[in-house]
Structure formats: C-alpha cells, structure tokens
Image (spheres, helix red, strand yellow):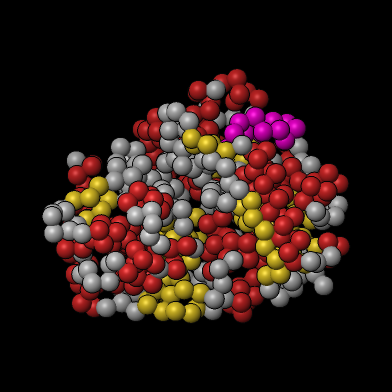
Amino acid sequence: MKIFVGVDIGTTGIRAGVYDEEFHLLGSGSGRSIIRRGSDNEIIQDPEEMYIETAHAVRNALKESRVDKRDIVCLSFDGQMAGVMGIDKNWRAVTPYDSWLDTRCSDQVALIKSKGQRKVIEKSGNTPSYNHGPKILWWKKNKPDVFSEIKSFIQPSGYVAGKLCGLSGKDAYIDWTYIHFSGFADITQLRWDDELTSLFKVPIEKLPKIVSPFSIIGTVTKDGGELFGIRKDVPVAAGCGDTTSCFLGTGALEKGIAVDVAGTASVLALVIDNYITDYEGLVYSARSVFEDEWYSLSYINGGGQNLEWFRNTFASQRTFEELDNSIEIIVPGSEGLMFIPHLEGRGYPNNPNMRGQWKGFTRDHEFGHFYRSILEGIAYEYALYMEKILSLSENDAIYNVRGVAGGSKSGAWNQIKADVLNCNYCTINREDISILGQAIIAARAVGHIKNVKETVKAIIKEENIFYPDKTRHEIYCGCIKEYQKLLAMYDS
C-alpha cells in the first residue's frame, strides 16, 4: 500500500493527514500556530516553533493512522502565503515569519504604489498590499544588517520542507501559486522581473527559484525523519499555498466554480481561463496548480476573525449555533444596520487607515441585528469582488460557490451569501480539503496519479445546496449600493 502525507501550516493551526491510495484519511494530527504580537503592528511567528509543531502534527497523524512508515512514498506541505521570512546560506532562519497579518510595511506599500503600482499589477497580477514585496523592502530599510545576511526570502511551508530535507540557501524555492504576492515576478512568464527588481533595488539573488507545485524538492534526512517519524529518503513535493490547496481540495478546477474559504481570512475566488489585471486593486490574479488555469480572487484580512471577536467580546457564553438562531426573524439588511468588516485596514484595494464600523443603528436594533450585519457585511464585500471578476474576465454570470472552512458550517450565513450573490451556494462532502490537496500533489509528484482533475472529481461531491431567493436578492442589491457608498467615505 502506498501512503501519502499532506500538511497544512496555517495561520490558526497546523494539521497533517495520512492518506491511502484512494485518498481516504487514515489519521490526522495537529500542531500549534503560535502568533506573537508586538509593538507597532508587529505580528510574527518563530520558524523553529513552526518546524517543531509541524513535526508534532505529522507524528500524531502517523500514530493515529497506524500505518507502516515504510509505506510512505511522498509528503507535501502547504502554508500561509502572503508573509515572508529570511534564511541564510545554511537554511538558518535569520528573521521571524513576518505574517500576512503584520501591517508594519504600510510605508513600503505606499512607496511601491507611488513608484510603480500599475507595472506591479500588470506583471505580478496583484496590487501592493501586506505581502512579499513591501515586507522585503521593510526588512531592507529597517533591518539592513539582517537583510545582508539573508540568502533568500521564503514562506513557512518552504522553510519546513527545506529543513526536513537538509537544503541549503542556494536551494531555496517558491512554487508558482505564491508569486502573485511577490510584487517582483512576471507571473505569466514564471520568472523574476528585471524591471521590477531594479526599480525597487531588490537583489534578484535574494529571491528563490520558481518551481511547479508537483516538483520534488528533496528527500527526508535522517535527523528530519527521526523528528517527524518518517523514514530517511522519502521524497518531498514543493506543494502550494494554503489557499490554493483549499481550492484544489474543494474541486475548484473548472471555469465557473467559485470557492468561499470562510476561515481566518474571508476569501472568494472564481476559476477563470485567462489572466486578468485589475488596476483598481480590488481583485487579483493567481495561478492554479496547473499552468493553464487561473483564479481571480480577493479577501478580507481577518474577515472570519470578526465573528470570533464578536462572540468573545459580546457573547462569550453563546455558541455560534445560538448566534445563528438569534438572527432567524431579522429581515435582510438588518433593518438598516450596516457593518464594515475591515477592522485593521483593508487589504484590497489597500487602505491601511480603514477601520470597522457599524452605521445606522438605533434603539430598535437588538443583539441579533449586530451579528447578522457582520455576516451581511462580508457578503457585500464578496458581491463587489464577484462583480469585478466577472466584468474583467468577460465570464458569464453563471457560477456556483462551494463553501469551505469553519464559516461554511453556518447555514444562516450560507443562505445570506446565496441571496446576496444570487447563486447556488453549496457545501461539499469533505472537510480535510487543505491536507487532501497536499496528499493529491504528493501522489502526482511521484506518478501515482496522472490526471489530477479526474481524481479530484471522483472524490469531491456537492452536498447541501442553498438556493437564492429573488425577493431577498433584490433587497440586498440596494444594501450593496449603500455598502459601496460607506466604503467610499474612506477614500474621499
């Protein structure tokens, strides 16, 4: 029997899964994602802790699965996408992981916008935000001694996989599903762009080589194998970004399928067959795990955290199911109460000064109105994303959304999204989507499967479908316009 291990190094936790040849989950394990908050908006993680916690997750998954480690034929890792960390020539971490939630690089975002925003969007597919380019420039300006030690800037999954395989700094890599966040890549040509790196004076040698998600980057060392509970010399695939792995594990591999990743970030993406650019910066283009397929998407920084914040602050004794029940009799639009979900600045288009807001509340509004308005505010933002994507890609306005992650367990929220977006919104038959995506990549990397799309189609099935209501959608169309006006107040 062949065994594949998929690992997700996420923002709120680390998860590993052990799979058989038909991608049944045999065992899973978890590790901590330890986030540290400092002064001046610093949000970081310790790379060594990431490595140890990932090993812990893998060992636990293997223990639960009870498989013979001699049957493991490949591992693959995904991870957080928009942040960066620096390693030296010996693969030693010389910076912490500068999280995608960290907004210290706001000045560098403004610098890139002023010097070359249009060119960055045109070539990399993404607008400057709290992502690789501004973060690299932040380290260059604020920590020049550290910057000089850095051999390459990489992401958490690459760091863990590379350390497990005993790579050196010259072997540093990034798979192509991340490079839209770089600000320095020609995403259509899969290469670092001389014009952009020269414009911002970034040494191109500090950027890792760009590889396919299905490429083998190394094999497990003796020391790494002992820590992870895996035999020496097992191949390790490059893997992909965590969001992209969600898309793969959700089966979003054909034009017209959209995915709502209702997790820490609220992400909405649509599969398209062409590369598009949005110079206004509301949405961006990203590569699929396949060279000829694209996603257009955008997300709310910490969108899903808004719900957790609300419950912890105002309803710590209530479950999310009870919160959903509190909105059953409240009409669409929350009787005029509107919520802006950008509590710590808007990522797309980037506006670090935007903050959360409730507008229009009166003494007639009760607890449930406030909760419902949060769910609706995120859905309104999604409506703006989808309108822009369909316009730029010249796609038919016929699509369906597959909802995944924790937020998709809320039937009330799923129905709101169906009504706001005026489309069928469904859940699927698997919850292990990120680690499943990595197991599939691992299997493809060693030739166990040839056709990834056919394999995924056979695994993933749509389950509960939420159909849009025409009357509620018409109400929400007016709400979306009001939401746009509220956002525009910040830009006036």
Q: Position of residue 288 (x, y in %)?
A: 55, 60
Question: Which residues fall within the magenta stretch?
Answer: 85-97
Q: Is residue 288 left or right of residue 18?
A: left
Which residue occupies 49% across, 63% down?
405
Query: Which residue occupies 20% across, 59% down?
Result: 366
Residue at (23% x, 42% y) in the render: 490
Image quarter (top left, top right, bottom left or bottom right) of the C terminus: top left
Q: Left of 10 or right of it: where is 347?
A: left
Q: Is residue 368 above or below residue 116?
A: below
- Left or right relative to 325: residue 156: right
Q: Quadrant of residue 412?
A: bottom left
Specify whether residue 170 is in view: yes
Q: Is residue 271 left or right of residue 16?
A: left
Q: Residue at x 28, y 67 (%)?
A: 327
What is the residue that sits farthest to the top in this orientation? 145
Q: What's the magenta bit mostly, secondary-structure-wise?
A: loop
Q: Is residue 395 visible?
A: no
- Residue 419 sits above or below residue 380 on the image: below
In this rendered view, identify the residue nearer to me: 198 or 373: 373
* Total labels drawn: 0
Position of 144 relative to 295 (above/below): above
Magenta stretch: includes residue 373: no
Q: Quadrant of residue 390?
A: bottom left
